[in-house]
Structure formats: C-alpha cells, structure tokens
Image (cartoon, helix red, strand yellow):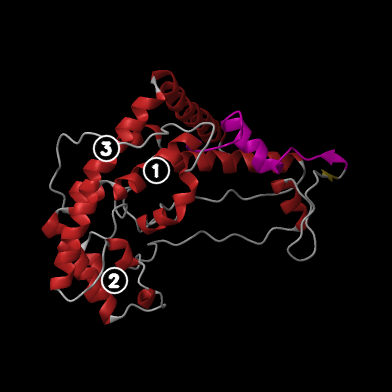
Amino acid sequence: MRTRAAAAGMLLLLGAVGCSPDRVDAAPARPEVTATPRVLDPVGLRLPLEEYQFSDAQWARVTSAQQILAAACMRRFGLRYEPVENAGRSPVRSRTDRRYGLADPGQARAHGYQLPADSTGPVSRPALSDDQVTVLEGRGVGHGPERSPAPVRHRGKPVPEGGCMGEARRALVRDGAVGEAEAVRRIDTASVLRAMEDPRVRSAFERWSACMEKRGHAYDDPWQAINDKAFRGTGVTPREIATAVADVACKRETNLVGVWYAVDAAHQRRMLAAAGERRLEALKERKRGQLAAAGHVLATRSASGRDS
C-alpha cells in the first residue's frame, strides 16, 4: 500500500510548486471560505482534489496489476519474478490525517510526533540476480553504484524501454506515468502551502502559538514544534510527548485544523476551477483509464489462476 507522506514533508515540497508550463493557477489569491467546520479528528475530512486522486484501495489495484504485468514480461525472457504484494498498511490513516500536523491525542501521548510503526511491515522477497535487475529495470548492472544507462539485450532479445516495469506501466497508461497526474500532485502541494500563508490560517497559528506559550512551549506555528531538532533522535522523550500533547490540545482549543482545512479546500476549489472543465475531465479520464486497465489485468489473472 502506498504510504502517504506525513504533512511535515509538505514544507520540503515548496520548490515543487514553482513555475511550470502546465501550471494550473499562476495567481494566488484569497479565495472565499463559506463555512469553517469544527474539527477534532481530521481523518474523515475530504478535499475537492480527492476526486482526481487514487484511494489506497485503488492504488493497491493499480500497483498489483503493474507487478503482474511485469512478471509476465519477465517470463518472456525466461526469468522468474514474484510480484510484490501490497501487504503493508500505512500508519497514516487518511490523506488528511497529518496534513495539518499531529491531531490525534492518543498518538501524541503514545508516540509524540513519531509515526506509529506499520502494522504489518513491508513484504520481503529474495534478492534479484543481475539478469533479473537488467530485464526488470531495462538497464545493465555495474559495479558499485554505477549502472549502464544504455538499453540492453538479454540473451539476444531486446529489453523493453524501462525494462519490464516500464512496459507494465505503459500498459496501464500510455505515457507510462502511473498514478496521479503531475497537475494533481502540484495542486495538492500548492493548496496546503498557500493556505499556510493565508491571513486566516496565520491568525489561527497566532492563537495556537499563544495557547502553546501558556503551556510552556514557545513555537510560532505547528511546524516549528514538529520539526524541533530536539525531537530528531530515535527515541521519544518525555519533552516531545509533552509538546505533542499540548500541540493537539491547542489545535482543538483554537480549531486550527478546521480553519486550515477550510482554507486549504477553498484554494483547491479555486485552482480546479481555473483549470477548466476540459482539463478536469482529462484528469478524471486518466484516473479511470488506469483503474479500468488494472481491473482487466486482475480479472484476467483471476480467471486464469495465474500471473498472466
């Protein structure tokens, strides 16, 4: 299963929302917020962009189909490849679970700002041989970190561009860029970052900061707390837990998550509207096409009883 990034990572993506020829919204503005919900638990919140994104269940189907197609391709080269099952479960419960920082008092008390460990963990598989890597990835294996960038042949047979994984991706979507469109990922990042700079959210940050100061913690905004260098060790300290518990309590007292979510959603609606109906329909069709292709692969496998 695809693990969603913790919201703190959004800060690292600031450079990803710069100028682009496919930029959806070039003029940030203060969009209208018609209602601000009272939010205690953000897990069930839904943002406008989700219509164009893959749920975890949908993404698991797409990646499972990709693995099946790659295994079938590998068999054409006389190589065995075991598809990797999506058995891991993300500790982040939804897209909005930590989009606005830590908000679960139970997790704060138990783990501070750290993410709970995956409940099942990643699936391990035997190490691949050089031939398997070459055909799977479409590039030769060098010594050390260097690999040949040139397409290769295996036993005289040309390997597909990007290897069997590349072939599998192109079977699911023509350009091989499996998953959400770049425009969707850009809006996802841009909206939450723009919301952070919105005066309504900045005011909520100030109220949260005042609340934290009363509890003995001096931070201007939640990201200063969650990114405190004192909390970067491997263990969770009592100080981190105390800070995280206060953080969640102050978010609830000031309704910071509710304000941030409302402004974030407003920015998404504005950017989606600016994209236009034709562009939005193309984004929907890109998602539908991948799900349909993945469904066909999985149905074929089920009917044949093997990875075909």
Q: Which mark is residue 112?
A: 2
Report the mark closest to the observer, 3 or 2: 3
Whether residue 193 appears in this view of the structure is yes
Question: Residue 172 vs residue 75: left or right?
Answer: left
Instruction: Give the mark nearer the N terminus: 3 vs 2.
Output: 3
Q: Regarding mark 1 in the picture, which secondary structure is present there?
A: helix
Instruction: Give the mark nearer the N terminus: 3 vs 1.
Output: 3
Q: Are marks 1 and 2 in contact (CB under 8 Å)?
A: no
Q: Which mark is residue 289?
A: none
Q: Position of residue 179 (x, y in %)?
A: 50, 38
Q: Find out whether residue 164 is within the magenta segment.
A: yes
Q: Find out whether residue 163 is within the magenta segment.
A: yes
Q: From the image, tell me which residue sits under label 3.
A: 30
Q: Are marks 3 and 2 in contact (CB under 8 Å)?
A: no
Front residue (pair 23, 278): 23
Q: Position of residue 55 (x, y in %)?
A: 38, 40
Q: Place residue 229 in its image quadrant.
A: bottom left
Q: Give the residue type that dot 2 points to.
A: Gly
Q: Give the residue type that dot 3 points to.
A: Arg
Q: Which residues are the magenta region?
A: 156-181
Q: Give the residue type that dot 1 points to.
A: Ala
Q: Position of residue 202 (x, y in %)?
A: 24, 53
Q: Which mark is residue 190?
A: 1
Q: Place residue 186 in its image quadrant.
A: top left
